Image (cartoon, rainbow, N blue to C red):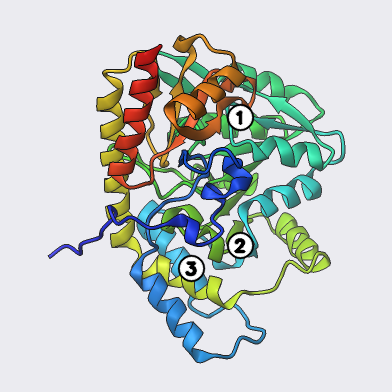
Amino acid sequence: MAEAFDFDEVINRREVPALKTHRMVLGEDGMDLFPGGVADMDFRAPQPVLDAMTQRLAHGVFGYETVPDGLLPALTGWMKDRHGWNIVPDHILRAPNVLNSLSMAANLFTNPGDGIIVQPPVFFDFADIIAENGRCLVENPLVLSAGKYDMDFEGLEACAADPRTKMLFLCNPHNPVGRVWSKEDLARLGAICRQHGVFVVADEIHGDITFSGHAYTPFATVSEADAINSITCLSPAKSFNIAACCGAFTIVPDEGRRNAFKAENSRLTVNKNNAFASVAMEAAYRQGGPWLDAAVSYIEGNLALVLARLNDIPEVTLITPEGTFLLWLDFRALGLAQDDLTRFLRTEAGWAITRGIAFGEAGKGFGRLNIACQRARLDQALDGLDAAISKR
């Protein structure tokens, strides 16, 4: 008998200082809006994770700890069983979070003023990391055609051929457009980068969340050459909704770069372990599979709801995703400037979602909606959008 999970359970995120429902994100005037921005789920974490943390709490002693013997085998077992990736344990380094690894990679393997390629519209922190570390943003925009985004490989070739360009930040699966890149796409990207000496840093934090008919391909599994010319940043944060109590992993197959990462970890003392993060991650990877499968199925149901409701709202177009719990919505038919669109969604539809412009100029007129929430609340939010557009 399949285990039952209640994703319709209403949980008050405001009982804790959750970023999604905090005035820092919603603003003082937006505390009653539908909080569809920050990329976490409104679902209770898997019970095995809660049990593991409760058991660790009961021990009562929280001194310095090493990495538990079972944590890395839990990660490697998960990646092998779920995604066919046989990660060499010695290639794994711990990290506080994925963004930390991206920032360290930029500093270690490029010089100030070097170019780093991104593929907008893409996760906004990529641009922030590049700017804050004194590197240059090199844009290789995705191409939107017939409701689907694809990579511009000719443009990528031109970007990579510039000798000042040294790195590419890959978002796989892609946030916010929801593409789950195929092995063929990744192989073509990898060949271009290797040909021109561009190192690939793959953010694959959404890899576990893919929809029916689509499979996540870890970039490092495309070929041995691509593995050596890349690092991969992983975390169970999105998969199991434990962003506030977990860490991350950096997979570094190349020995020289791995040693450089280790030395930088030591220099910055990024080498401490959090007892609760360790037990949460191990429990998630060992026992969280059924919960994740059910969560993805529920999210697919939410996606179906959005698709059905938008049939009656022709002014808004959904770029149908292949994975992640984030939807990329095209509001351009409303004919509103970006600030006016934001104001319309907030004051008339009751929506607080992520502005498309945050993901680069290619995001103008779009917005990112998080659908990892209770279905009834999502339906209510869609009622608000429908009513607001009908008034126009």
Which mark lies nearer to you, 3 or 2?
3
User: How many labels were placed on the picture?
Assistant: 3
Camera-side mark, 2 or 1: 1
- Determine crowd level at label 2: few under 14, some 14-19, many 20+ residues with C-alpha closer than 10 A: some
Position of the C terminus, as image quadrant, is top left
The residue that disc 2 covers is 91
| Nearer the observer, 15 or 104 | 15
Q: Residues within 10 Å of mark 1 (few under 14, many from 20)?
A: many
Which residue is rendered at x = 56% and y = 19% of the image?
A: 152
Task: Note whether 302 is above or below 338 in the view shown.
Answer: below
Question: Residue visible at 78% across and 59% down?
Answer: 260
Tell me, yes or no, whether the two marked residues, 1 and 3, touch with CB atoms within 8 Å: no
Residue 238, position as x, y percentages in the image: 47, 52
Q: Are marks 2 and 1 in contact (CB under 8 Å)?
A: no
Q: Secondary structure at mark 1?
A: helix
Q: Nearer the viewer, residue 136 or 121?
A: 121
Q: Is residue 216 above or below residue 337?
A: below
Q: Position of residue 290 (x, y in %)?
A: 28, 61
At horizontal 57% and vertical 18% (from top left) the residue drawn is 340
The residue tagged 3 is 281
The residue beneath circle 1 is 359
Residue 299 horizontal side relative to residue 63, left or right: left
- Residue at mark 2 to residue at mark 1: CA–CA distance: 31 Å
Which amino acid is tagged 3?
Answer: Met
Q: Do the residues under discs 3 and 2 have CB atoms within 8 angstroms?
A: no
Marked residue nearer the N-terminal end (2 or 1): 2
Mark 1 / mark 3, whichever is N-terminal: 3
| Residue in view at x 39 percent, y 52 percent | 83
Q: Position of residue 338 (x, y in %)?
A: 59, 19
Distance (Cα) linking label 1 and label 3: 29 Å
